[in-house]
């Protein structure tokens, strides 16, 4: 199958794979950083220990996901700002669509993180044993 090439010499396949590549690099970077906690994570962990609460691995995962979503949002904003400098209108349309798609995904993931935090903050009610007949 012949690749469609625009005036800049970039194939559509390369343009579509760009956001996927960016996400893969961010995930890889995130995984590499998990081995060495950030100064903010250290400060948060020491504050929790000072309050008498041990750091929870689930909270660290949610904090890391929140940080990753902030990075994705920043990259998406940067990409959105750069679209205007492209001369190829078809390329602009494609990248604007990608920006909108990423905004929706980031919003949905942030909503899921918030729901998970609320679920963890809600105390679990003990279930009363069923009485036999």
Image: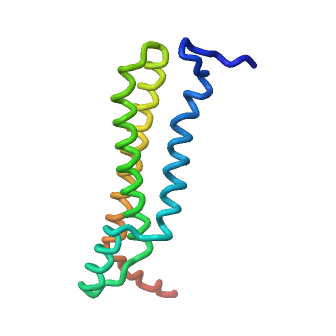
Pick the residue in front: 108 or 41.
Answer: 41
Identify the image quadrant of residue 60. bottom left
Identify the image quadrant of residue 76. top left
Residue displayed at 57% across by 14% down = 6
Q: In this view, does 88 lie above or below 72?
A: above
Position in image of residue 46 (x %, y %): 29, 80
Q: Is residue 115 above or below residue 69?
A: below
Pick the residue in front: 124 or 127.
Answer: 124
Task: Give the side of residue 5 with respect to residue 90, left or right.
Answer: right
Residue sticking out furthest to the front: 8
Position in image of residue 3 (x %, y %): 68, 19
Quadrant of the image containing the N terminus: top right
Q: How many labels does the image show?
A: 0
Identify the image quadrant of residue 72. top left
Task: Give the side of residue 58 with respect to residue 27, left or right.
Answer: left
Q: Is residue 71 above or below residue 133?
A: above
Residue sticking out furthest to the right: 1
Residue displayed at 43% across by 19% down = 92
What colour scheme does the image use? rainbow
Task: Give the side of residue 118 with respect to residue 8, left or right.
Answer: left
Pick the residue in front: 115 or 31.
Answer: 31
Position in image of residue 26 (x %, y %): 49, 50
Position in image of residue 65 (x %, y %): 42, 58
Residue displayed at 41% across by 32% down = 99
């Amino acid at each position: 199958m012949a690749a469609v090439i625009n005036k800049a010499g970039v194939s559509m396949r390369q343009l579509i794979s760009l956001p996927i590549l960016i996400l893969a690099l961010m995930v890889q970077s995130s995984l590499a950083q998990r081995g060495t906690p950030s100064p903010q994570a250290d400060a948060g962990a020491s504050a929790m220990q000072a309050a008498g609460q041990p750091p929870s691995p689930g909270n660290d995962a949610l904090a890391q996901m929140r940080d990753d979503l902030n990075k994705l949002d920043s990259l998406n904003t940067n990409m959105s700002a750069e679209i205007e400098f492209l001369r190829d209108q078809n390329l602009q349309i494609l990248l604007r669509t990608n920006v909108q798609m990423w905004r929706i995904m980031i919003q949905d993931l942030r909503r899921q993180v918030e729901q998970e935090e609320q679920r963890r903050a809600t105390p679990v009610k003990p279930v009363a044993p069923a009485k036999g007949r």
